[in-house]
């Protein structure tokens, strides 16, 4: 595995995570030559030293001071961000209520649509700025933030803008009503994209929003708030309160919120569902996953290898729908694992701003510790651990792509969501066994199928208990395509006509 | 305590020899309906069911235990795979057959209602007619709901992308306490029409229509375990079902309002889908109850050569 040069400004404390010795039996593709660094310039974005809360169209300090948000690739502090307290959440909800009743609720859908189109256009115009800021704050490779996160975020606003004046045709009756104030809590893995997934449908349906970005990745949501200002979005229609878990809990439990939408861990999702019990407030949850990516022996092998890599190493595996369990047909296991190792040896880990980087930084030290501890459990329980030869940058939070073979269903690495670049390989013999193993989890967010046999794809797709099934592809997203889980992966859908239901009184 | 059921008292058989004692009718033992069988409660308990107006003892109903509730979930779980995989056409046929069987038992159901809810004879017969019509309405849905609730999604790339509804799994239903037949059917029929398997807690005070309905279901080609009906104390049974990890969704509309929050908290333990929606049971139902326990599955496949 090649390593991109350490990110600018890195020094000091050694990095953490696994650093296995190079393996002689694995050919290191490209070992004979090196890529020159190709960093994207960070000059395109100006980061303020300190950010306030965005409430009622104004930037105000938080009652609980500030906290630092760091670049996980270097551990440098990027900015200090206001910590919202309960009174701040009160203010934000009140501002959203006021905007809902006076401005956004009464506004014709066609006018709401134009605001959303404006936001989509500004996102496109400032896309490089958003991409760089996202990679700085989150640690994901610029290639992903530039080609996936930001374009999809703009697409979500563009798609939902068109719904705003067509809700009567969406299948929810002639004049479906919005719910009111939406409290929206989003995770750190796709900070801007998750904000778009939440805000765009809510606003299109006529709700106003209080958005709580994740503690470790607040900056693109704050830049999005600036875009809302630029688009002349009426004050209070979108409010952004930054903070940690306490701010999120205060927002979720706030009696002035009509609808709560949460994306994050299953544990917190359960706590929010319990907190809302008996209130009659609407809730949608998009929670964890432990997806099976199922490869049959007749699969298009090159495409399948790319799909496996994309499935688990996209965004460092910080993906709720990541294909973290590779179920490979026994007769193909050896070939698939060998090819997978060869392919992983070509991945480049390092500076997220480098345009050649495939694997960026783990988002936080806390997450790195969790990944490391689960990987250690995989070894302790008897699975065989492998990583490509890989130098980790000396500073920042890094974890080498890791593959476990010899994994059984009872192993923690086969049952628990790792949310990191760790793949567990299990085998099966028959399609029925593949279905049984794939469904043997309390989660049900996504699944992958790789085979050239069309009837088998349909047979499998009907039986996999998951909200998204990718056949001969993986990790595809689109604003027109409903996304969401079965069982403990949550309820409600985001995207498409179905996603609108989450923000309408239907 | 008076003797049960004046409903089936001694009567004169015209063919009997003169002077013979009047024939003694055979009374029904009210039991649970689990996995297609009619067991008593494993606890051996029963409770008296009284007429709404007179307080007269109508019957003893089985008082299901927590163990009975768990057994019902196991039966429903076992039945779900085949029921959800049956063709929608077949499910519609079975539901229509249920309507036929209810029509055939209309007299007994009307009698159950007249005693249990204090309805007049004519009102009870009208209510049973509405129940039959409701089954017929839902019998038409299984092979149409995917066309209404599904979609073909135009994504920005060379992919076929379809969203289809699928049943959520095992659904617990706490039936309305007051409307013991039309309310019961209005909450049960959409659950199984959507392809789920159901565990029903019948109206606690008025369980007799549910028991008769179970007999109709048992003779209507509804596969064993697709519908399981418990009679007993709602406060005892509902928490077991709300907390059960083998239950995917729960309709708590029939639970008294003060008890709902506690059940919702229990339901959060495995992220159950929770429905609480009171309705005018006499009105034409919308799609809400049918959609409440459907999941949307989206399937992608590349289009290419």
Image: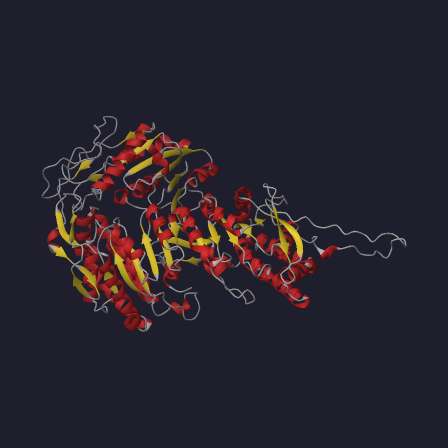
In front here: A276 or A108? Answer: A276
In front here: B94 or B261? Answer: B261
| Residue found at x 18% / y 65% | A58
Q: Is residue B2 above or below residue A456?
A: below
Which residue of the protein is positioned furthest toward the front in this rendering? B1
Q: Please say whether residue A267 is visible from this viewpoint.
A: yes
| Residue found at x 53% / y 46% | B80
Residue B118, x across and y down, in percent: 64, 63
| Residue found at x 43% / y 58% | B151
In front here: B257 or A103? Answer: B257
Residue A101, x across and y down, in percent: 30, 71
Check the picture and name the quadrant holding the C terminus of chain A: bottom left
Q: Please say whether residue B297 is visible from this viewpoint.
A: no
Which residue of the protein is positioned furthest toward the top in this rendering? A24
Horizontal side of residue A226 vs B144, given as left or right: left
Residue B43, x across and y down, in percent: 58, 41
Check the picture and name the quadrant holding the N terminus of chain A: top left
Q: Is residue A56 above or below residue A381?
A: below
Horizontal side of residue A69 vs A180, given as left or right: left
Horizontal side of residue A19 vs A251, given as left or right: left
């Amino acid at each position: 595995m090649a390593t991109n040069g350490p990110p600018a400004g890195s020094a000091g404390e050694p990095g953490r995570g696994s650093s296995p010795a190079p393996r002689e039996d694995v050919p290191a593709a490209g070992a004979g030559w090196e890529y020159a660094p190709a960093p994207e310039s960070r000059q395109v974005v100006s980061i303020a030293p300190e950010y306030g809360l965005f409430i009622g169209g104004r930037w105000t300090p938080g009652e609980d001071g500030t906290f630092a948000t760091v670049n996980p690739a270097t551990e440098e502090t990027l900015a200090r961000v206001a910590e919202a307290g309960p009174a701040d959440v009160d203010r934000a909800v009140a501002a959203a209520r006021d905007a809902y009743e006076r401005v956004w609720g009464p506004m014709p859908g066609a006018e709401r649509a134009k605001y959303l189109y404006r936001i989509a256009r500004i996102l496109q115009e400032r896309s490089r700025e958003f991409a760089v800021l996202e990679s700085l704050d989150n640690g994901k490779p610029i290639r992903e933030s530039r080609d996936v996160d930001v374009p999809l975020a703009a697409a979500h606003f563009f798609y939902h803008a068109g719904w705003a004046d067509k809700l009567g045709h969406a299948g929810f009756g002639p004049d479906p009503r919005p719910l009111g104030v939406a409290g929206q809590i989003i995770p750190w893995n796709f900070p801007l994209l998750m904000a778009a997934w939440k805000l765009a449908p809510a606003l299109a349906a006529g709700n106003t929003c209080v958005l709580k970005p994740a503690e470790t990745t607040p900056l693109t949501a704050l830049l999005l708030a600036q875009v809302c200002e630029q688009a002349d979005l009426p004050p209070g229609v979108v409010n952004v309160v930054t903070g940690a878990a306490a701010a999120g809990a205060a927002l979720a439990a706030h009696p002035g919120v009509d609808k709560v939408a949460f994306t994050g861990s299953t544990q917190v999702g359960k706590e929010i569902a319990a907190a809302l019990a008996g209130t009659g407030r609407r809730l949608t949850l998009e929670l964890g996953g432990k997806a099976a990516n199922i490869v049959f022996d007749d699969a298009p092998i090159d495409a399948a290898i790319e799909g496996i890599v994309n499935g688990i190493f996209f965004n460092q595996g910080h993906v709720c729908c990541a294909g973290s369990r590779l179920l490979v047909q026994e007769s193909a296991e050896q070939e698939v694992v060998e090819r997978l190792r060869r392919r992983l040896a070509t991945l480049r880990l390092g500076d997220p701003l480098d345009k050649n980087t495939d694997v960026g930084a783990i988002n936080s030290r806390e997450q790195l510790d969790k990944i490391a501890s689960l990987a250690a459990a995989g070894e302790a329980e008897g699975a065989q651990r492998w990583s490509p030869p890989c130098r980790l940058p000396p500073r920042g939070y890094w974890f080498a792509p890791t593959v476990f073979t010899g994994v059984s269903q009872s192993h923690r690495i086969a049952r628990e969501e790792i949310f990191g670049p760790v793949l567990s390989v299990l085998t099966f013999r028959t399609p029925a066994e593949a279905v049984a193993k794939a469904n043997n989890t309390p989660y049900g967010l996504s699944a992958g199928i790789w085979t050239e046999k069309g009837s088998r794809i349909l047979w499998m797709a009907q039986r996999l208990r998951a909200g998204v099934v990718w056949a001969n592809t993986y990790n595809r997203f689109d604003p027109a395509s409903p996304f969401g889980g079965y069982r403990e992966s949550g309820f409600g859908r985001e995207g498409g006509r179905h996603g609108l239901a989450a923000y309408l009184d239907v | 305590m008076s003797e049960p059921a004046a409903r089936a008292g001694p009567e004169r058989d015209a063919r009997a020899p003169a002077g013979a004692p009047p024939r003694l009718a055979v009374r029904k033992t009210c039991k649970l309906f689990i996995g297609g069988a009619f067991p008593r409660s494993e606890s051996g308990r029963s409770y008296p069911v009284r007429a709404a107006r007179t307080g007269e003892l109508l019957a003893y109903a089985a008082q299901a235990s927590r163990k009975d509730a768990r057994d019902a979930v196991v039966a429903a779980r076992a039945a779900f795979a085949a029921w959800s995989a049956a063709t929608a056409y077949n499910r519609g046929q079975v539901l229509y057959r249920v309507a036929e069987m209810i029509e055939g038992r209309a007299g007994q159901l009307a009698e159950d209602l007249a005693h249990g809810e204090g309805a007049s004879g004519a009102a009870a017969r009208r209510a049973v007619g509405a129940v039959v019509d409701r089954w017929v309405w839902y019998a038409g849905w299984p092979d149409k709901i995917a066309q209404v609730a599904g979609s073909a999604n135009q994504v920005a790339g060379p992919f076929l992308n379809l969203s289809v509804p699928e049943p959520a799994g095992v659904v617990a239903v706490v039936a309305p306490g007051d409307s013991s037949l039309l309310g019961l059917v209005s909450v049960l029929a959409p659950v199984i029409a959507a392809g789920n398997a159901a565990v029903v807690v019948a109206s606690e005070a008025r369980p007799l229509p549910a028991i008769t309905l179970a007999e109709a279901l048992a003779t209507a080609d509804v596969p064993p375990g697709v519908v399981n009906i418990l009679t007993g104390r709602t406060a005892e049974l509902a928490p077991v079902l709300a907390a059960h990890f083998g239950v995917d969704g729960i309709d708590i509309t029939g639970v008294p309002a003060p008890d709902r929050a506690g059940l919702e908290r229990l339901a959060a333990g495995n992220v159950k889908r929770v429905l609480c929606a009171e309705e005018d049971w006499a009105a034409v139902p919308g799609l809400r109850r049918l959609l409440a326990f459907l999941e949307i599955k989206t399937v992608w496949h590349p289009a290419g050569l």
